[in-house]
């Protein structure tokens, strides 16, 4: 029986960077649901945050804590910032090219809730894509595509590997000395989102089945500036960097109304800006736009070439036209809880990195562009710890019966659509206790039906989000409660 040294679940920045750092003499298998490109990293526009120098570390920590409403794990935030420079320069030394300024130095730019310019970009507004392509080029191991995790092989606090669907009916079991979960968040649980359609929270559902309780699942971030009115499953994002460079949020009369909600206007934390748009549009029955009137066309095309091209394809001529916007699901602050080594507490050899993890870094609201950084920093920590730990399994010690699952059932599609609508209408930007309780009861009814394996796992994760939201009786960060009337 073949046993891998490492099994990595997910092909985003966290999974691929972990693979890059594992010695080439180790036997590594990376699995992804579709192609390696079907991940959130590939679509990340904004950039990657980093402390600019040692003097900036305390300020980066402070900004992260302030955005997270001081609900963050301060130790995790310190680990993130203190390791940021070395982690970024490790990538640069390996050949990754970030954008430079006119002096040939790293071009740091500003984004919302950062007190200074500290965001690095690549190819203007395609930072995630450029990092992803670079890491794919560095990938030196085995990869299995079109593989959807159906179970984790866990017994006595040891993970022996995982089970996958490799087509509609066939399943495959893989054993590994170390397993690294890097499967992303839960975007496809919501009707309107910016995520890859592969991101649906199934692995989180598996963890719940195994008795691993998820943490802070009520903390869901909605991106304020998503193109409104398109028919794509994944809604086109208008990067935070646009506002950092001078784009304004306005109503149909040109009023910059976000200043009515926060002194920093468009550069307030994401939860504030999202709620401002939601509240203003609802109360005033006015459309909301992103305006680029401050930009010269030549600069805009150079700084945001991909946004310019993508919006041109759907009929907008930037920077001359305003674009209608609304918030949409973007990121999960909560997830599978880990210790400071990116390992699940009490597990011997199961690590979680990237958005799937709840390190405590983001608190109640993630600071812009800290997500790519988290994936880079904590994937490095996970690999270093696992190499030092050198844990070995024997597949013969796994005594549990390996079950066979039905991937999908006929009723699944309708329930999936109902679930996405239910989550958007009841557990989104502004919440009511009665709505949360209603949605929770509906999800529990869905769980009693004969649904396929993948939908069941999604429903378990949705149930966890709703239960956490019901349990938190007061507003905090991205969890914003409105009184029932």
Image: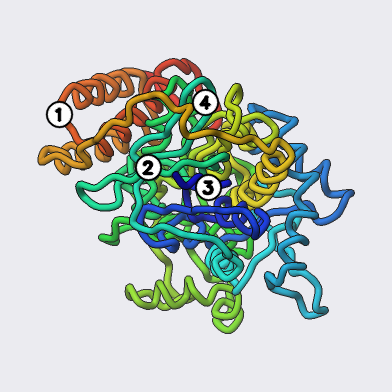
Q: Secondary structure at mark 4?
A: loop
For disc 2, the marked residue is 173
Q: Secondary structure at mark 2?
A: strand
Residue placed at 22% from the left, 25% from the top? 447
Closer to the chain start, of discs 2 and 1, is: 2
Spatial separation of the CA atoms under disc 2 and disc 1 = 24 Å
Quarter occupied by residue 205: top left
Spatial separation of the CA atoms under disc 1 and disc 3 = 35 Å
Return the x and y of residue 124 as percentages of the image width and height: 60, 72
Quarter occupied by residue 384: top right
Residue placed at 53% from the left, 66% from the top? 129
Q: Is residue 232 visible?
A: yes
Q: Secondary structure at mark 3?
A: strand
For disc 4, the marked residue is 215
Nearer to the camera, 188 or 58: 188
Q: Quadrant of the C terminus?
A: top left
Spatial separation of the CA atoms under disc 4 and disc 3 = 29 Å
| Residue 163: mark in rendering | none
Label 1 Cα crowd, 10 Å radius (few <14 / some 14-19 / many 20+): few
- Asked if residue 103 lies left or right of residue 254, the reply is right
* Callout in the foreground (1, 4): 1
- Asked if residue 43 lies left or right of residue 422, the reply is right
Return the x and y of residue 203 as percentages of the image width and height: 41, 37
Q: Is residue 258 visible?
A: no
Spatial separation of the CA atoms under disc 3 and disc 2 = 12 Å
* Callout in the foreground (2, 4): 2
- Asked if residue 455 lies left or right of residue 19, the reply is left
Asked if disc 3 and disc 2 are in contact, CB closer than 8 Å, the reply is no
Rendered view: 79 above or below 433:
below
Spatial separation of the CA atoms under disc 1 and disc 4 = 28 Å
Return the x and y of residue 65 as percentages of the image width and height: 70, 35
| Residue 4: mark in rendering | 3
């Amino acid at each position: 029986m073949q046993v891998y040294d490492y099994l990595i679940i997910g092909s985003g920045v966290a999974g691929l960077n972990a693979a890059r750092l594992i010695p080439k003499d180790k036997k590594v298998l990376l699995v992804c649901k579709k192609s390696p490109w079907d991940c959130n990293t590939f679509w990340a526009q904004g950039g990657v945050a980093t402390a600019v120098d040692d003097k900036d570390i305390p300020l980066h920590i402070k900004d992260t804590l302030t955005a997270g409403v001081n609900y963050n794990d301060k130790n995790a935030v310190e680990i993130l910032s203190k390791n940021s420079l070395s982690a970024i320069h490790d990538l640069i030394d390996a050949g990754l090219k970030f954008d430079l300024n006119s002096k040939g130095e790293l071009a740091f730019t500003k984004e919302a809730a950062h007190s200074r310019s500290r965001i690095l970009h690549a190819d203007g507004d395609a930072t995630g894509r450029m990092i992803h392509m670079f890491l794919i080029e560095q990938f030196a191991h085995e990869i299995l595509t079109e593989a959807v995790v159906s179970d984790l092989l866990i017994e006595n606090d040891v993970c022996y590997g995982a089970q996958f669907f490799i087509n509609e009916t066939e399943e495959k079991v893989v054993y590994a000395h170390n397993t690294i979960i890097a499967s992303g968040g839960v975007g496809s649980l919501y009707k309107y989102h910016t995520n890859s359609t592969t991101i649906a929270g199934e692995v989180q559902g598996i963890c719940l089945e195994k008795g691993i309780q998820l943490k802070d699942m009520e903390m869901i971030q909605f991106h304020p500036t998503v193109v409104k009115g398109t028919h794509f499953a994944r809604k086109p994002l208008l990067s935070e960097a646009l506002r950092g460079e001078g784009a304004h949020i306005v109503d149909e009369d040109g009023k910059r109304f976000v200043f009515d909600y926060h002194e920093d206007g468009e550069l307030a934390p994401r939860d504030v800006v999202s709620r401002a748009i939601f509240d203003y549009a609802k109360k005033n029955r006015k459309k909301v736009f992103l305006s680029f009137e401050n930009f010269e066309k030549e600069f805009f095309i150079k700084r945001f070439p991909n946004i310019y091209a993508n919006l041109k394809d759907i009929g907008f001529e930037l920077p001359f036209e305003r674009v209608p916007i609304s918030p949409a699901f973007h990121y999960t602050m909560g997830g599978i809880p880990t210790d400071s080594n990116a390992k699940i507490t009490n597990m011997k050899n199961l690590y979680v990195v990237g958005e799937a993890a709840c390190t405590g870094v983001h608190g109640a609201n993630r600071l812009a562009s800290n997500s790519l950084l988290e994936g880079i920093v904590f994937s490095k920590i996970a690999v270093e710890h696992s190499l030092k730990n050198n844990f070995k399994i024997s597949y013969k010690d796994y005594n549990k019966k390996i079950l066979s699952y039905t991937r999908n059932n006929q009723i699944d599609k309708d329930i999936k659509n109902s679930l996405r609508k239910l989550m958007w209408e009841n557990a989104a930007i502004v919440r009511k206790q009665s709505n949360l309780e209603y949605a929770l009861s509906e999800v529990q009814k869905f769980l009693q039906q004969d649904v396929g394996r993948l939908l069941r796992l999604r429903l378990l994760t949705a149930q966890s989000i709703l239960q956490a939201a019901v349990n938190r009786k007061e507003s905090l960060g991205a969890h914003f409660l409105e009184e029932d009337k």
